[in-house]
Amino acid sequence: MKIFGRIALIIAILACGGAFYFAKQLGKDRNDLRVVRDGLIADKTKLTADLAATTETLKNTRQTLEKTKEELVATVGLLEGEKIKLAQKTQEADNCKVTVADRTRELDETKAQLAKSQDDMKKIQESLASAGITDIENIEKLRDKIVNQTKDLELLGQQMIAMREKTVKLEQKVEELSTTPVNLRGTVAEVRENWGFVVLDLGKNQRVQTNTNFLVYRDTKMVGKVQVRSVGQTTSIAEVLPEFQRTALRVGDLVVH
């Protein structure tokens, strides 16, 4: 009996020790779980804040994108309108060139007629000399014919001069319609750096033509070069040529053709 009592006592002591150990371990695990829970709560709070910030940024980005799309649509519409106007001016220039070609052909024909008349007169003179004509009546007729031919030659000469003047005027008009004046100056009125375009305060009123190159200056120093892509009445849209750009272009920079 004493042995069983000692065994029971040992078992009770072991049971108490095990219970104490498990209680202590359980408390530690509970503390660890509380730390993990607090960390998860903090992570959730941070993620919620990050999500809200990201949502706001996305909203702003969408608004900016919509505005950019609207501006792009407006610019495309402007470019299409300018293309139509450019096509009309190009057609006018082509018509002027055709007119110049017609006048030049007429001038060449007049010159040929004049040369033929002079050759006919020379042949008549040679025939008269070889025939030894001395009859006054025949001489008078010949004189009248020569006088008439001289008048015809004078008229042809006047026509040639008039045609030459018309040709010069037409050539000048074609030149005005198809070239931008040398040393034409203006300024940068607007900069669209994201699109690589600038707006110049020069247009059709200043005879600006498509594909015209302008040097850009700031304080007497060249900062870039642009090429006109479309021309309005008072403004032009020009592409910035990156191979010549030395710094970002600004409103007010001087442009020179």
Image (spheres, rainbow, N blue to C red):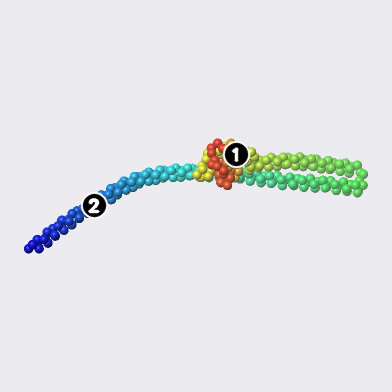
Residue type, mark 2 in image: Lys
**Residue in the image at 24% along x and 50% along y:** 31
What secondary structure is found at the residue carrying circle 1?
A: strand
- Return the residue at label 2: 28
Query: Which three-letter amino acid code belongs to the residue tagged 1?
Result: Lys
Q: Position of residue 189 (x, y in %)?
A: 54, 37
User: Residue 194: in sight, yes or no?
Assistant: yes
Judge left or right: residue 230 versus residue 6.
right
- Quadrant in which residue 178 is drawn: top right
The residue under the point 91% across, 44% down is 135
Report the side of 106 relative to 75 (left or right): right
Q: Residue 96, image x and y in percent? A: 65, 44
In the rendered structure, the answer to whether residue 77 lies left or right of residue 14 reads right
Using the image as rendered, state which of residue 121 and residue 186 is in the foreground: 186
Q: Quadrant of the N terminus?
A: bottom left
SS for tag 2?
helix
Looking at this view, name the residue that lies furthest to the left: 1
Dot 2 or dot 1: first in sequence order is 2
Q: Which mark is residue 221?
A: 1
Q: Quick one: 91 or 212, which is closer to the camera?
A: 212
Is 22 placed above or below 230 here? below
Q: Which residue corresponds to the image point at 83% horizontal and 40% vertical from the top-left?
A: 147
- Residue 242's x, y, as percent? 56, 46
Q: Quadrant of residue 165?
A: top right
